[in-house]
Amino acid sequence: MTNAAPPLERLFAGGRHIRLLLFGVPPPELAIPPLDHVERVARLVRPGEYGPVVADPARLPFIEALFDRALVTTTLPSAGIRAELRELWRVTAPAGLLLLVVKARRRWEWQASGWTRDALAPEIEAAMFEVLDWRVETLPDRWHLILVCKRDGLRPALIGRVVEAVATVTV
C-alpha cells in the first residue's frame, strides 16, 4: 500500500472526462493539480463556510451517480457523519473514487478536534465505501488522507410505486 502512488495523485489520474465534486475548502498545503482535464467540476461548501455554492451535506443537490471522483475536505462532524457519507455514496458513480481529507487526532488527545482512525474506519465501512489507501500526512497539522471507492454490491432500494411492465404481442 505504501508503494502505490499518493492518494491525491490516484484521485486525479485518468481520462479527460472526469466529473469531479470538490466539497469543502482544502488545506492550503494540499497541492491540487490543475483541473484542465476535468469535464465538469462542482464546488460546494458546508453552511457557515465561505464558498461558491453552499449545500447541506446530508442533502446534496445532485442526481444519483453524477460524479466519478470527489475530493472531500469539509469537516466531518461526529453527529450525522454516516448520513453525510451515505449522501456522498449516492452522488458517486459506480467505481467512483473519493478522497476524504479529514483532520486527524491521536487517541490521547481528548480535547482536540478531528478523528482517530479507530473511530472513523467503522463509519466509512457503514457508509458502504471500501478503503483503498489510508495515510496520515502533516499539512502542517495532521490529516487523514483516505482514498475510498464505492462498494456497489447492493441493489438500490425501490422508492415509490412499483409498476409492472405489460408486454402486448400482436400476431
Image: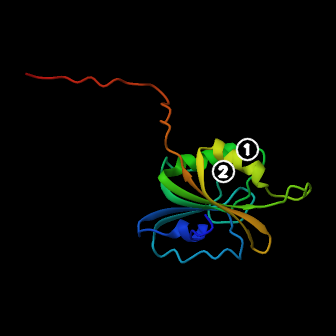
What's the image's color scheme? Answer: rainbow
Measured as percent of width and height from the top left, residue 162 is found at 42, 25
Q: Which residue sits at x=30%, y=25%? A: 165
Q: Mark number for residue 92?
A: none
| Residue 18: x %, y % from top left | 45, 64
Left or right, 78 with respect to 169, comes to right
Classed neighbour count for the residue bearing mark 2: other residues with Cα under 10 Å, few (<14), some (14–19), many (≥20) = many
Count neighbours of disc 1 (C-alpha within 10 A) and say few if under 14, some if 14 to 19, many if 20 or more.
few
The local secondary structure at tag 2 comes to: loop
The residue that mark 1 highlights is: 80
Where is mark 2, residue-wise? Answer: 57
The type of residue carrying mark 1 is Gly
Query: Does the image show residue 59?
Result: no
Residue positioned 70% across, 49% down in the render: 121
Q: Amino acid at mark 2?
A: Pro
Split into 4 quadrants, where in the image is the N terminus? bottom right
**103 up-or-down from 131: above or below:** below
The reply to whether callout 1 and callout 2 are in contact (CB within 8 Å) is yes
- Front one among 129 and 61: 129
